Image (spheres, grey):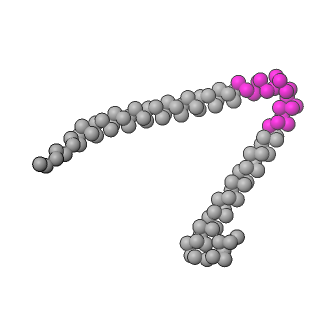
Amino acid sequence: MAERSPDLKALARADGRGLKKRLAKGVSTQLLTFGTLIASRFLLVPLYIGAWGTDLYADWLVLLSVSWLLQAAIFGQHWRYAKEIRDAWAIRDVAQMNL
């Protein structure tokens, strides 16, 4: 006996409802995360200044900024070397791959 093929329109409708639900859940989660981050930025600054004072808070911001700058530099170097190794791999240059 031949098997009956599934009703493709019904499957598409079912998947569409699931997709809409997953999309709405993902968007709402992202909005909640974004709202939490923004609220914490605005709420923590006065708490830090109140607890540490403006001079210590300024020093902390400088140290934090330097660490972010170093992380960005290291991340940039990583991508640069990864690109060089990938390019050497593409032309099969083994000596160049051993940076």
Q: Is residue 84 above or below residue 9?
A: below
Magenta stretch: includes residue 67: no
Extreme-front residue of the structure = 1
Image spot of residue 50 (x, y percent)? 82, 22
At x 86%, y 26%, the residue is 53
Residue at image position (24%, 37%) is 10
Image position, residue 62 (x, y; %): 82, 40
27 left or right of 6 in image? right
Report the magenta residues as a range: 43-61
> From what the image shows, is residue 12 above or below residue 49?
below
| Camera-nearest residue between 99 and 23 | 99
Q: Is residue 19 left or right of residue 53?
A: left
Can you say which quadrant of the picture contains the C terminus? bottom right
**Residue 68 place in picture, x, y as percent:** 74, 45
Q: Viewed as shown, does residue 50 lie left or right of 99?
A: right
Q: Residue at x 56, y 76 (%)?
A: 91
Which is the main secondary structure of the residues drawn in magenta? helix
Quarter of the image for residue 13 reads: top left
Is 46 left or right of 93, judged from the image as shown? right
Which sits in the foreground, 42 or 3? Answer: 3
Residue lying farthest to the right in this orientation: 55
Quick check: is 46 in the magenta stretch? yes
* Residue 51 percent location from the top left of the image: 83, 24
- Disc tally is 0
Q: Quadrant of residue 49?
A: top right
